[in-house]
Image (cartoon, grey):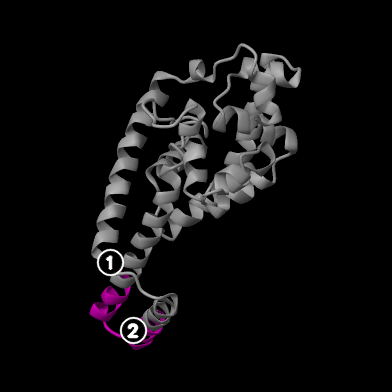
Amino acid sequence: MNEWEKELSDGFDPEEELSEGQQRSLAIEQEEALAIELERDERRSLEKPEPPAKQKLKRELEQEALARLESAARTVSDWNDVIAWWDKLDANRERRERYHEISRSGDDLPIDYGAKEDGPRFPDRMNSVLERQRQKGDFIDTIFNCPYDIHELVTEEYMSKALSLLSEDHKEILYFSAIRAYSTQLIGALRGQTDRNIRKVKNTLLKKIRKKILPELKRRKDLELPMTKDEREFLAEMEAQS
């Protein structure tokens, strides 16, 4: 139990902070996690294990083949083949990232939610998201489960840079608000501040984050780079306000 959990262990149940929308998100996340596990099992059953040296050689040969294809491309059809290859590589990368992200219980849920109600382990905390990750040998989220390393809990580089530039006070408020889903009243009690002050600081830090990530999203739109639905909606909302 870390120092923040010790402060909250007396008479506070964080499950009370879980909203109806977060409960729906959690249910969706659990269904997606099951689908991913089934996909993994199917891939394992179809793929034969190869020695590491052979896997490395295969990757190098594929990189050389792609480089030759790009150098030889002259016609529209040739470039469509190049684009199709890169699309396949991007799809594989996004799938690997999704394997990591889905175990985080989704963007709208705090990091410790997602414990299986009918989990096979006792005590119940052994069924939490973080504990299940540790049992699989995945310690990344556990290592960075700290307010001051919150920038390590996101996958996009532009977002990580924006969060890393925040002050320690802002990181702490954002961590308890976004990751732990604590109310502003509870955060104020932890920090010895009023609820009103916490809301004011939270609005300030969110404005800072929006200001830093907006240029990157505009650049992606201008270059017609892939964007998530949330990124497109956020950019449209910000452009409508300007």
Residue closest to the eye, 148 or 99: 99
Q: In front of the other: label 2 or label 1? A: 1
Q: Amino acid at mark 1?
A: Glu
Left or right of 218 in this view: 93: left
Type of secondary structure dominating the magenta stretch? helix
Residue on which the image places disc 1: 47
Q: Taking 68 as reference, is 110 left or right?
A: right
Q: Is residue 69 magenta?
A: yes
Asked if residue 116 lies in the magenta stretch, the reply is no
Q: Residue 3 vs residue 158: left or right?
A: right
Give coordinates of residue 18: x percent, y percent: 47, 20
Relative vertical location of residue 169 with respect to residue 200 in this rendering, above or below: below
As displayed, is residue 173 above or below residue 78? above
Q: Secondary structure at mark 2?
A: helix
The stretch in magenta equals: 63-83
Residue in the image at 30% along x and 85% along y: 74
